[in-house]
Amino acid sequence: MSAKSAIPIVVGLSGGVDSAVAALLLKEQGWAVQGLFMSNWEDDDDGYCTAAQDFQDARAIAGELDIPLHRISFAAEYRARVFDHFLSEQRAGRTPNPDVLCNREIKFGVALKYVHRLGASHFATGHYARLIQGPGGVELHKARDATKDQSYFLHAVATGHLAQTVMPLGDLEKSAVRERARRAGLPVFDKPDSTGICFIGERPFREFLSRFLDPRPGPIESPEGEILGTHQGLAFYTLGQREGLHIGGRRGRSEQPWYLAAKDGARNALIVVQGHDHPLLCSSALTTGPVHWLSEPRVAPFRCTVKVRYRQVDQAALFEPRGDGTARILFDDPQRAVTPGQYAVAYEGDRCLGGGVIESVIQTSAQQAAA
């Protein structure tokens, strides 16, 4: 019997293939595996939430692996700690990333506490990331499969919570994960990946948001102040957006598509430009809110790479910590559609150092000339 057989571990079983294979691998390694299904969104009257089917899939996985399955709802905590903040940021005209808060507050927050109540010493998930024991403690590294890496979404989790976590898929390609599930007879081996907002799922975003936020129409303008149309509220749009602006062709203008370049909260106006690479869509630098460090906090400027959105290719930058815990980040190359409310996450090679909420963007000289 493996030495790990005496160590209980709880796997967050979502009903998908990734968490199913995480549980499979841990059981093969000799852990005493239990499953935990979380259904944290209970407003399911529109047909988009898949929690009921996901639970049935989780039950089938647990049955196939012969492990116990617990079910819990953290809907109240999710509403208070994640969704209320999401709505507040949207009202302010920013574009939040609820998946980052969901990981910090729910999956590796209240759920981790519940795992300990179940008597387990560790919590495991199907995230694509690697946790490596370094000289100063646990380190968060990118997954081997760069196309699936989720370290960006995990950068705000407390280091102490990561130390109590196992992520078995970090060294695997997604194709290998599906093959392991198929060979093991797991019924979800070909189930499509989940998308959309954490625990809420994929749904028409503007329609969903309008259930919680009232429309606040205002002008859509060119940088020169020409009125081009009417928007339904700053909350319903994001920087860089092309679809949904409903701006037709204009006499005397090119036929290039329009993109959202800025939000003017004081005047409740959207500023749009023509052309995917218009200077007003680009920024040379940004400032962040307080930085959450997953390494020893830096005090001096240093070179690194930075992501300002999930799946973005790492961008070379100078990271300048500030005395108040915030930071300024200067990019080697201008970045398109840097969006307040999203996160800037820093890396040294494959190691995630941490990150902070994007608070403001700094214009390039080309921007200033074009404005």
Image (cartoon, rainbow, N blue to C red):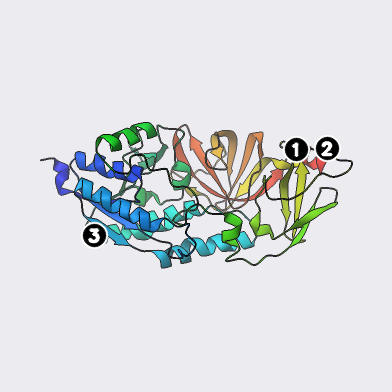
Q: Cβ–Cβ below 8 Å for labels 2 and 1?
A: no
| Distance (Cα) linking label 1 and label 3 | 55 Å
* SS of the residue under disc 3: loop
Q: Nearer the viewer, residue 232 or 346?
A: 232
Q: Earlier in the sequence, mark 2 or mark 1?
A: 2
Farthest-out residue, front: 47
Task: Give the amino acid at mark 3.
Answer: Leu
The residue that mark 3 highlights is 118
User: Mark 2 Cα within 10 Å, few/some/many (few <14, many 20+)?
Assistant: few
Left-right relation of 209 to 263: left
Q: Quadrant of residue 76?
A: bottom left
* SS of the residue under disc 2: loop
Select label 1 or label 3 by which is in front.
1
Left-right relation of 301 to 143: right
Q: Earlier in the sequence, mark 1 or mark 3?
A: 3
Q: Position of residue 13 (x, y in %)?
A: 32, 51
Q: Quadrant of residue 19?
A: top left
The residue that mark 1 highlights is 275
Q: Position of residue 140 (x, y in %)?
A: 40, 41
Left-right relation of 353 to 161: right
